[in-house]
Amino acid sequence: MTRRSRDVPQEPGYVPSRPPEQPLIHRLAENGEITPYTDEEYGVRKDGGAGITKPVNSSRGLLFLAILLTACVGGLVYALVQVALTDQWHILGEVWWVFPATLFPFLAAWAGYAKERKAEKLRRTKNLPRPVD
């Protein structure tokens, strides 16, 4: 018997088990139990990472951040309109970096909110507790 097939049963018709369709993430839930979640059910990252502050990861918190960043982008659009109306385009040469620096968190906040909201709906339909780590 070869080394590779030592632990495999040699019965006719044997089919090795396949990994699950979606890999499961085993995390600690609010109720204190380790619960398996699919990637879609888990949502955004729940642990604190290596940072000092705890990240915002609830759908309400992410919605608040997304609305706040939407107001910031609205302020940038207003400033751009004012620059165009007063014909002071030289200002954009000094503050051009503000646009990509605000646009990336704006898009990330809305994407994170959509992902967590979808995960909350899936957890609610499957009666799963919210992961805490």
Image (cartoon, rainbow, N blue to C red):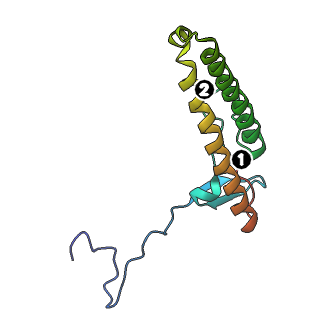
In this rendering, position of residue 60 left or right of residue 74: right
Quadrant for the N terminus, please: bottom left
- Type of the residue with mark 1: Val
Q: Secondary structure at mark 1?
A: loop
Please say if 11 is above or below 99. below
Please say if 3 is above or below 80. below
Q: Position of residue 55 (x, y in %)?
A: 69, 34
The foreground one among 51 and 17 is 51
- Type of the residue with mark 2: Thr
Q: Which residue is mark 2?
A: 102
Quadrant for the C terminus, please: top right
Which marked residue is nearer to the observer: mark 2 or mark 1? 2
In this rendering, position of residue 17 left or right of residue 116: left
Q: Which residue is mark 1?
A: 132
The foreground one among 28 and 5 is 28
The foreground one among 80 and 84 is 84
Q: Secondary structure at mark 2?
A: helix
**Pointer 1 local density, CA inside 10 Å: few below 14, some 14–19, many at least 20:** some
Marks 2/1: CA distance?
29 Å
Image quadrant assignment for residue 4: bottom left
